[in-house]
Image (cartoon, rainbow, N blue to C red):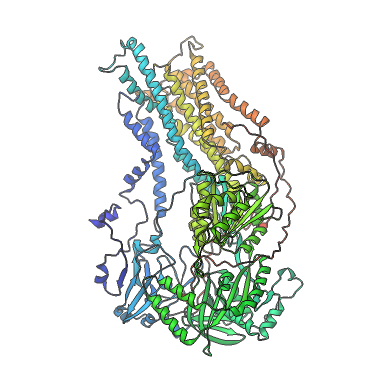
Amino acid sequence: MGSLLSRLGLECGAKEVKEEERNIRANDREYNLSYKYANNAIKTSKYNIFTFLPLNLFEQFQRLANAYFLFLLCLQLIPDISSLSWFTTVVPLVLVLAMTMAKDGSDDIVSAIPFNPSIRTFDVCVCLCVYTCISFKDPLSLFALLLFSSSSETNLKVKQGLTVTGELEDSIEKLASFDGQVRCEPPNNRLDKFTGCLSLDGAMYSLDNEKILLRGCTLRNTQWCFGLVLFGGPDTKLMQNCGKTTFKRTSIDRLMNVLVLSIFGFLAIMCLILAIGNGIWEYQEGATFAAFLPKPEGVNPPFSAFLTFWSYVIILNTVVPISLYVSVEIIRLGNSFYIDWDRKMYYPKNDTPAQARTTTLNEELGQIKYIFSDKTGTLTQNIMTFNKCSINGNSFFDNRSLSSKTERVDFSWNKLADPKFWFHDHSLVEVVRGGNPKAHDFFRLLALCHTVMPEEKKEGELYYQAQSPDEGALVTAARNFGFVFRSRTPESITVVEMGKLVTYELLAVLDFNNVRKRMSVIVRSPDGRLTLYCKGADTIIFERLHPSSKNVMEATTQHLNEYAGDGLRTLALAYKDIDLNYMEDWKKRHHEASTGMEQREEKLDALYEEIEKGLLLLGATAVEDKLQDGVPQTIEQLAKADIKIWVLTGDKQETAENIGYSCNMLREEMTEVFIVAGNTAEEVRVELQMSRNGLFCLLKKETMEDEPVNGEYAMVINGHSLVRTKNPVTGHLIAYALEKDMQKELLRTACMCQTVICCRVTPLQKAQVVELVKKYKQAITLAIGDGANDVSMIKAAHIGVGISGQEGMQAVLSSDYSFAQFRYLQRLLLVHGRWSYLRMCKFLRYFFYKNFTFTLVHFWYGFFCGFSAQTVYDEWFITLYNLVYTALPVLGLSLFDQDVNDRWSFQYPQLYAPGQLNQYFSKKAFIYTVLHSGYSSLVLFFIPWAAMYDTVRDDGKDIVDYQSFALLAQTCLLIAVNIQLGLDTYYWTAVNQFFLWGSLSVYFAVTFTMYSNGMFLIFTSSFPFIGAARNSLNQPNMWLTILITSILCVVPVVAYRFLRILLWPTINDKVRHKMRQEKAVLPAAPRRIQPRRISTRRSGYAFSHAQGYGDLVTSGRFLRRTPRSRGIVFSHTDSPLAQAKPQLYRTIVEGEEPPQIP
């Protein structure tokens, strides 16, 4: 029974007991089943075949509008209340529910895991993993080497099993007799951490994240593996990370909820007025009609007024837009397709198109005020080249600007050199070939201290697979200068040193993480020497140096200052010799800590900290990460659109500053660039106050407005000044700016600046900065990044954009929109975002206009029908008005309209400003729309009423009847709202024309059909308006009335818009006027050469915010992963920005603008 309920999605389990520790025993099914761990069944869909209909209907009726119309349907079933047939509500409600149900069903099918159900996948421990390596025969290949590519990573990672289990090989008998027991952590969502241990033959062996294969990975470089299942089904880390994603709603969605509630209030007021009128009318005039309209027994004026209130609730229901939500979803879906199909956002080099991963946020793209961007891989290419280095106080550099005058270094003496590596400083080669011991130690460290994996298909043809581009660049540099990393096993590293093959015994790998910001290896050389090699951020390394390195440190610091001028990423290198006895004791304590289940990471960090002291400085490296094409132009365009850009990076302050100058975010002509780098709360507070020049005042507001600033300012704030953290060396608490008492002070200072750069920030700090701006600023935020360390920032912002670059796909998978290059961001915002916002606002204004106008005519008619809840229109017109007659024209407007084309959108970025200010749709604009509808409804009711009052046909017969008046009123209404639609349309297409004229044609065709004799004879009670169309519409005075009514409806709108454009033209009006004048393409502006900035500030190297893979050294050589090739969808042509062409910019001064009305 429980299984059946589980399959139906209705499982109601007992109180869940929290699992503290997991115990698994190999080849002991009864023991494992006693713990009742989850099986491998997974349910990722929301519905199944039995629950889809009831659950989906339950969810849909949680929406206020749907529940309201269900309530109306119930009211219409009461004969004493309803004056409308039931189908007037059922037809639109069923269509809306069916369309939404179809969309939800398709989304749920897509969300289901596309795994083959016949393939069983788990999270497995690879302690049992053994394989035969297909690339070469080696006894050490018994140790597992598993390279995998998960759905969120593009580069290969290394996995290895325990050495002790390698003896099992692929023997089924040995595997069946294996009786090891695993104790590990309970199921959790930490992808970068695993704690466990294996008990085998009385010994304990440590299990960590490098010995675990996760569900969804793909094996490489191994024919097979055996494993012990630890987590299955919902317990796997993949499913633990598939929690509910926070649903992002746009500002228009939030405003819509408020407006719908206001509409309900407005409806209640209208119904109350009409109900009171009915009570008064019944009291004064009701007895007059009692002779031929006798009242039911017990019905008095108060009770009649009560019934009339609910009758008018039914009649005036169209003021609440039931089809609004479905129409909004269709519009958003269409605008999302435009992003997917945009060839100008397609990157042919990687065959990567832009992708809208959500359909609910398109109009929000036209309202962005703050952009939070990562640097490495987002603004830069994340393709590293070895550029400069400092060895024992001597600087060597590769000046690319002199490459035409200086010959490249000839590496022909090194048969294993990489032919793609370029260097122009011949003195460095002379030092290395001259036998300088420090230079040899420098490049030996680069060849040993890393987690790179080699592949050698042919003798001498080496290929390196690195987890980060930095490591690949450094190992390649060591290779070319004579220290070639050749191969590795779990216990050794083989290096060719100046032509001599040397094998080092690998004793320990002290891996990198976000707190340590360094990596070390401990090796034993063939002569028995024990050495620790360490590389890391210069500030971290300098704190751990031996006093004897003082002189070298001073020279190296000077070189780092020189490197900062080019914005290079730097890394400090150091080493130390280790005593044999101390090493034996340290390894023993290390084994105890690594096999413990409690506070394993803390104990290991303490051991690492202990041994990484007293280091001797060797020097520093500097690698170059070039900017992507079009980044400066994109940032310049976004700045002209009044979008403020904040860069949140893990790089050092000086490196971030120089990238800021290269990207045009920081400019020499700026009034001032503030620096906030305090190490105490008081220092940070003083620096913030000084930045504001004494203007600081703490306002008691939950939100803060932008303050006027004279000049252009920028601010650079260091990560250690943002959030309180603990210094791992001194133990002191540092960093304060994001503390609660200084949040507003930081934000107010930062928001006065055009550009803000936060350097040395962690992923958590990135998200906190975004949340701070969201909390106190009434502005829409966008975060853009390319790596796993940007995921928290992307999820925190209103809109997240992922760049598919060198750091995997985690950012893309967590984003709302994705593309391949930063330069496409300006097209996403200035074109697609602005168009989407404009279209959505036009749709909402027009939708409310046509519905309010339709409904208010009923309201005025109530005063002329004795408040009897009689409808002014035919019932079939009421049913088809929103579904057929006015549906397609407004969709055409909302999908194809544009005020200016994409070229002019780039030409004048100021066109983006109205979206930031919510000028096109707001509460004020909604009130103007209601007033406009009130005026139109007065014209549409009283002009036809006056025209038909005591009117006769041209043959002398009377035509003053209800049916003729209803036909005239509804025809005037439909023509008037379509004319208003035409006035709102800027960009006419064949589709718009077809929808508009087609809808009018359908109306007349349906009207003549439904009012025909045949329909009356077949369905007498459903089609009572027999002959009304042909008897009324053949009269000239009817068409004259339609013409006069239409003119009176549109004249005020045309007059207002004419005067507004003439006296108070907006930026859109001016640009559209200029666009009409200039049909030819504007000439391109001369290209502005950005001078290279030279600075003496310190530079710093930033590790990627991802756990390292130091323990993943294994035997064998792995195969390079061949990227899957996709068919080229588009031609290999790129946008002008791909060629870094600047955008022409012209200043337009706006005058004072009056309030806008539709």
Q: Is residue 478 visible?
A: no
Question: Is residue 226 depicted above or below 1002 in this figure?
Answer: below
Can I make out residue 774 in this image?
Answer: yes
| x, y percent for residue 843 | 52, 37
513 relative to 660, above or below: below
Residues 481 and 766: in front is 766
Left or right: 955 in relation to 751: left
Q: Quadrant of residue 427?
A: bottom right
The image quarter in which residue 186 lies: bottom left
The answer to which image quadrant residue 446 occupies is bottom right
User: In screen coordinates, is 1028 left or right of 36?
Assistant: right
Which residue lies at the image location 41% right of the left edge and 43% below the top edge? 100
Residue at (73%, 54%) from the top-left corner?
1087
Q: Position of residue 625 (x, y in %)?
A: 62, 65
Where is residue 1066 shown, x and y percent of the image?
64, 36
Residue 450 shown left or right of residue 714 in the figure: left
Q: Is residue 657 above or below residue 700?
A: below
Residue 595 on image: x %, y %: 38, 76
Residue at 31% in and 79% down: 178
Q: Residue furthest left?
A: 1
Q: Residue at x 38, y 82 (%)?
A: 164
Q: Residue furthest bottom?
A: 527
- Seen in the picture, residue 1047 relative to 62 is either above or below; the reply is above
Outermost residue to the front: 682
Asked if residue 858 lies left or right of residue 443, the reply is: left
